[in-house]
Image (cartoon, rainbow, N blue to C red):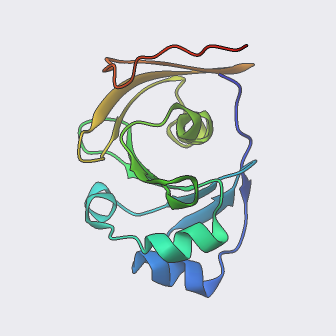
Amino acid sequence: MPIDHITKTEPRQQRMKDFNLKTVEFYKGKTKFMLVFQNEEEIINIKPDFKTISEFAQGGVIVTAAGKEVDFVSRFFAPYAGVDEDPVTGSAHTALIPYWSKVLEKNELTAIQLSERKGFLKCVNKTNGVEMSGECRLYLKGEIFIS
């Protein structure tokens, strides 16, 4: 997948209140915000205010920290799009993989998205994009007919 280039920025105070925790860093990507926290426990314990998030982050909010048993962990919230919390988000990892690759100084990474369902990903940072692999579950099957 193509990389979502993120830019470090200063958060508005209200945004931090929405997560009730102190972030280490705050980034803006093409459509998403990414908040970096101190540790995995903070990511697990986040209780986001979905109404407020939907007002300021129409592309969604990624929260992340270094992992205990994997390189990094994350969660993704997109209430504006009707998804309070996505179980495993490939598009979020287009920002996460390059960020953690640079921080950890390695191109092959492991990750867990800590949603209720959880998802383990093997990630590769490449010059022209990122690769992700892992197990997936079929959740919808259908056909579209165009007349």
Q: Is residue 3 left or right of residue 68?
A: right
What's the residue at 27%, 58% (across, down)?
A: 44
Res 127 visible: no
- Quarter of the image where the C terminus is located: top right
Residue 47, horizontal then vertical, whole percent = 33, 70
Q: Looking at the image, which residue is at 57% across and 85% down?
A: 14
Residue 99's place in the image compared with 60, above or below, is above
For image coordinates 51% across by 13% down, the residue present is: 143
Is residue 116 toward the left or the right of residue 66 in the image?
left
Which image quadrant is residue 112 in?
A: top left
Snapshot quadrant of residue 2: top right
* Relative depth, front residue between 130 and 101: 130
Residue 20: image location, x then y, percent: 39, 81
Residue sitting at 52 percent across and 79 percent down? Answer: 16
**How far from the left and from the top, in percent, is residue 49?**
43, 75
Residue 100 position within the rendered picture, expressed as x and y whole percent measured from the top left: 53, 40
In which quadrant will I find the N terminus? top right
> Could you tell me if residue 1 is visible in this image?
yes
Image vertical order of residue 16 relative to residue 7, above or below? below
